[in-house]
Image (cartoon, rainbow, N blue to C red):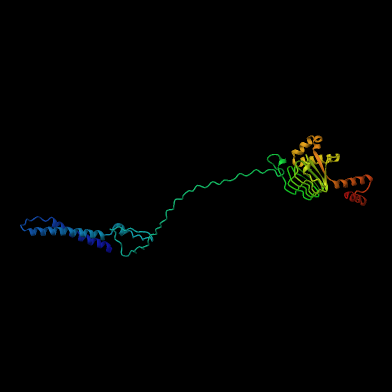
């Protein structure tokens, strides 16, 4: 037998002896006595015997190992984990005390409740519908809108240009060979013009044809008071001019869809009388000399013809 079993047996014998003594004391017959002190002494002996018995029982219960403790070896403690041992379990002296590892306590902060802010609606402007690049829509009558600014066609030497609208001041200033059509001009139109052809299907500003020495201008419903007649004359259209103006009107309609030019072509024989020719005097003399030289069979660009032109221009 092991020393553990011997120790249990020894404590059991002691417990039995103490229990027998206690019971014998408690069950002793009552002997009447006339002395009060003897009665008190017997009562104290009985109480001491009972207290001794209870103390031995408690000691034996604490020191007596249980079946699980004697048969199964104690479980080694796991680091970081708390091991609970009952109070009535005896721990063998060879057992290794558990390593004291404080448990890790993680305190997570309470996340704040997000406040939902409604998004501000963004106003997206509507995309404008693009208009065709080759057309410009005006509000109202096109002939009452200024479509080009000042000094348009300045010094142009060749080519054609038609405008369905009104031009600014000094339209076709110093024009020297190009062809232009417009539906009205500002002040100083055809100023210092030396060549080319201008067709105006509308009103004109003051000081028209000032310093004009060459080229021709055709004006619809001309106000002669606004023409500077220092170098030019105002004449009705000649037969050759009728063909030139009619051709320009058709080109104007094709290029700009001009309602003014289209209206004139609907009754051209009648509306042709509304147009006037603005012709420089010296320029007309030059044209007459060249026409006479061609009739004589001379070279229009020859030396003799140019001498006649110089004589005619000096008056």
Q: Residue furthest bottom?
A: 94
Q: Quadrant of residue 66?
A: bottom left
Q: Nearer the viewer, residue 55 or 175?
A: 175
Give the mark count.
0
Q: Is residue 249 left or right of residue 118?
A: right
What x and y, as percent, mark residue 8? 25, 61
What x and y, as percent, mark residue 32? 6, 55
Q: Is residue 17 left or right of residue 237?
A: left
What x and y, as percent, mark residue 97? 34, 64
Asked if residue 21 shows in the view, the reply is no
Q: Nearer the viewer, residue 102 or 139?
A: 139
Q: Residue at x 14, y 56 (%)?
A: 26
Q: Nearer the viewer, residue 304 or 22?
A: 304
Q: Nearer the viewer, residue 168 or 41?
A: 168
Q: Residue furthest left?
A: 34
- Determine whether 11 is above or below 141 in the image: below
What x and y, as percent, mark residue 246? 81, 39
Asked if residue 51 shows in the view, the reply is yes
Quadrant where the N terminus is found in the figure: bottom left
- Determine whether 23 is above or below 135 in the image: below
């Amino acid at each position: 037998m092991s020393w553990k079993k011997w120790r249990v047996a020894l404590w059991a014998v002691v417990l039995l002896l103490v229990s027998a003594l206690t019971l014998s004391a408690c069950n002793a017959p009552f002997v009447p006595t006339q002395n009060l002190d003897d009665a008190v002494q017997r009562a104290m002996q009985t109480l001491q015997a009972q207290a001794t018995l209870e103390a031995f029982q408690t000691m034996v219960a604490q020191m007596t190992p249980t079946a699980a403790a004697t048969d199964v070896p104690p479980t080694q403690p796991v680091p970081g984990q708390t091991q609970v041992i009952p109070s009535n379990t005896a721990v063998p002296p060879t057992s290794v005390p558990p390593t004291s590892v404080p448990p890790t306590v993680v305190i997570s902060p309470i996340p704040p409740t997000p406040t939902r802010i409604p998004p501000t609606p963004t106003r997206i402007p509507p995309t404008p519908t693009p208009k065709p690049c080759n057309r410009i829509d005006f509000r109202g009558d096109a002939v009452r809108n200024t479509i080009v600014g000042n000094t348009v066609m300045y010094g142009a030497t060749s080519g054609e240009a038609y405008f369905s609208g009104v031009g600014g001041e000094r339209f076709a200033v110093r024009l020297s060979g190009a062809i232009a059509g417009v539906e009205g001009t500002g002040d100083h139109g055809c100023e210092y013009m030396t060549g080319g052809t201008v067709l105006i299907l509308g009103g004109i500003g003051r000081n028209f044809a000032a310093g004009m020495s060459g080229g021709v201008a055709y004006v619809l419903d001309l106000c002669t008071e606004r023409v500077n007649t220092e170098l030019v004359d105002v004449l009705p259209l000649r037969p050759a001019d009728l063909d030139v103006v009619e051709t320009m009107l058709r080109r104007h309609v094709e290029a700009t869809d001009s309602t003014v030019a289209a209206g004139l072509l609907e009754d051209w024989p009648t509306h042709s009388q509304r147009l006037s020719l603005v012709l420089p005097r010296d320029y007309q003399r030059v044209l007459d000399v060249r026409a006479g030289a061609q009739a004589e069979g001379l070279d229009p660009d020859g030396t003799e013809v140019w001498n006649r032109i110089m004589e005619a221009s000096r008056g």
